[in-house]
């Protein structure tokens, strides 16, 4: 496992150098990006606020910026367009991250769902499905939803 990835969300606010294209780090962020796009599109279309939320989340959490960030986002969009399911992407995440980091990804998914100011039932269903594929218990699903809801409503968290 990549040590930097095991602690990627424990280091919120700290920047890491961008990973070279094709690295395991980039592949992980591509997988996360596809899942974030999946949630953004779950209600039929991705709003500008959801797309911006995806960009900000990946930039902040990964430390990617500039062309490295654009490359990951472009690759995630292309993979999303070609995807027939979530399994390949969640498999990559499961192989690289532990439960705590996967819970933070779940919170990022909720953040995208709340980005447009409303939570759609299709978004909730999609996140529930992804949580299962990430082998996260229902308690993690509920707790991450509540943390994201508080943040979305300005309550911090």
Image (cartoon, rainbow, N blue to C red):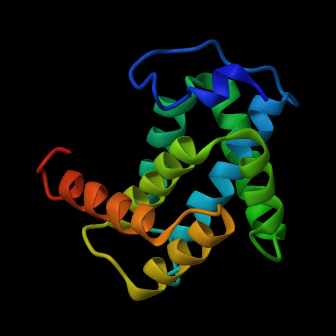
Residue 107, given in percent of the width and then of the height, sits at: 42, 54
Residue 115 shows in this picture: no
Residue 50, image quadrant: bottom left
Quarter of the image where the N terminus is located: top right
On screen, 11 above or below 108? above
Taking the view exactly as shown, the residue that stands out farthest to the bottom is: 121
Query: Image height check: is 111 above or below 127?
Result: above
Tell me if 5 is positioned left or right of 79 in this view.
left
Q: Is residue 87 left or right of residue 114?
A: right
- Image quadrant assignment for residue 152: bottom left
Q: Residue at x 88, y 31 (%)?
A: 22
Q: What residue is rendered at 67% in x and 41% in y? A: 97
**55 left or right of 50?**
right
- Given residues 97 and 54, the one toward you in this image is 97
Up-down relation of residue 98 to residue 15 (above or below): below
Closer to the camera, 117 or 35? 35
Please indicate, yes or no, whether residue 64 appears anywhere in the rendered image.
yes
| Residue 14 location (% of width, % of height) | 44, 15
Where is residue 79? Give x, y as percent.
Answer: 80, 59
Furthest-left residue in this view: 155
Q: Position of residue 91 (x, y in %)?
A: 80, 57
Quadrant location, the C terminus: top left
Frontmost residue, 110 versus 70: 110
Q: Nearer the viewer, residue 3 or 41?
A: 3
Report the residue at 22% width, 51% height from top: 151
Query: Within the image, what quadrant is residue 86 found in?
Result: bottom right
């Amino acid at each position: 496992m990549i040590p930097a990835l095991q602690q990627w969300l424990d280091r919120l606010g700290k920047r890491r150098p961008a990973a070279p294209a094709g690295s395991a780090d980039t592949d992980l962020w591509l997988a996360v990006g596809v899942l974030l796009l999946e949630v953004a599109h779950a209600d039929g279309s991705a709003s500008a606020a959801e797309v911006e939320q995806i960009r900000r989340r990946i930039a902040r959490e990964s430390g990617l910026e500039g062309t490295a960030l654009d490359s990951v986002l472009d690759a995630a969009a292309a993979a999303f367009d070609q995807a027939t399911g979530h399994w390949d992407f969640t498999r990559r995440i499961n192989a690289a991250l532990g439960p705590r980091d996967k819970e933070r990804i779940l919170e990022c998914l909720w953040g995208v769902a709340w980005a447009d100011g409303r939570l759609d039932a299709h978004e909730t269903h999609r996140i529930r499905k992804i949580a299962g594929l990430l082998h996260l218990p229902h308690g993690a699903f509920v707790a991450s939803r509540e943390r994201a809801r508080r943040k979305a409503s300005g309550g911090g968290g």
